[in-house]
Amino acid sequence: MNKPRILVIEDNQSLDDLLVETLQEDFAVSYVQDGATGISRVLADPPDLVILDLMLPIVSGESVLKTVRKTSAVPILVLTAVQDKGKVVDLLEAGANDYLTKPFDLDELTARIRVQLRTANTAGRPVSRATLQIGDITLDPTAYTVQVGDQSFPLAKKEYAILKLLMGHPQQVFPKADLYTAVWHEPYIGGENTLAVHLSNLRKKINQPGGPQYIQSLWGLGVRFAPHAEAGQ
């Protein structure tokens, strides 16, 4: 049985190492150390649970929480040094599922993780590997294929990741830098040609000649998946 996947968004290396060591027996644990990368990872490959620190570089934990909650119901357990109950209430109202105040007990953290995972499973939260279908486009995560009408096309790993992210947020425009970072987990610098090649390959498979143009580039803005695209658009 696959272990539940936990993403830790925390910039303290010592705490990251401690959490991995403590949790790795029962969970598949990975971590990132800034808020921007955290957002990209959650959107591109949703984990089963997020452990989120509030004091993060680049993008704050509060901003990560608000951004993720726009599109994802992934359980989020917040780690905070804040003792202000009013602040904690604000976090819960913004979408946090639970919180622990630093310093915290590791056994209590583990117990709270299990509670959130049980709650998520009971609620029937869709699993990240589910087949994704919009109109006549079906993305199969098991076979790594996309079916367009009655035609099926194999996908490279990065092509699949790009399409999954775009189809998971139809009509949302992703700046190319954000799209690249979300899929490759590295800065966009130098990745423009790589992304262009993968988008071109996807268009050849999905944007059928004379048919709907599902993957669209908006000049100066980014890329989106348009589920109701008109032929030749």
Image (tube, rainbow, N blue to C red):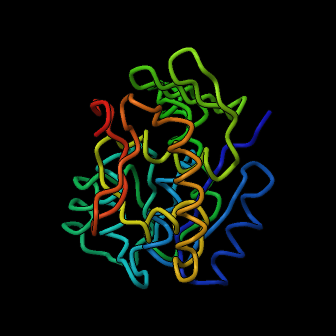
Query: The N terminus lies in which quarter of the figure?
Result: top right
User: In the image shown, does 149 or 95 lie closer to the viewer?
Assistant: 149
Residue 163 image position (x, y, % from top left):
52, 44
| Rendered view: 75 above or below 29 | above
Q: Residue furthest front?
A: 210
Q: Residue drawn at (49%, 55%), measured in percent from left and top?
A: 42
Seen at 61% across and 48% down, the residue is 159
As drawn, is 56 to the left or to the right of 31? left
Left or right: 110, with 20 as reference point: left
Image quarter in which the C terminus is found: top left
209 horizontally vs 229: left or right? right
Image: 69 above or below 33: above
Q: Nearer the viewer, residue 94 or 183?
A: 183
Percent across and percent down for residue 25 are: 81, 53
Question: Which percent across, then down, holds residue 40?
Answer: 48, 63
Instruction: Provide residue 225's location: percent of width, then percent of height.
Output: 37, 43
Q: Nearer the viewer, residue 172 or 11?
A: 172
Q: Residue at x 59, y 30 (%)?
A: 146
Q: Residue at x 64, y 83 (%)?
A: 13
Residue 114: which quarter of the image? top right
Q: Looking at the picture, tell me which residue is in the foreground, 206 or 36.
A: 206
Name above or below for residue 109 compared with residue 47. Answer: below
Q: Quadrant of residue 144?
A: top right
Q: Is residue 137 visible?
A: yes
Is residue 112 visible in the rendered structure shown here? no
Instruction: Name above or below for residue 136 compared with residue 206.
Output: above
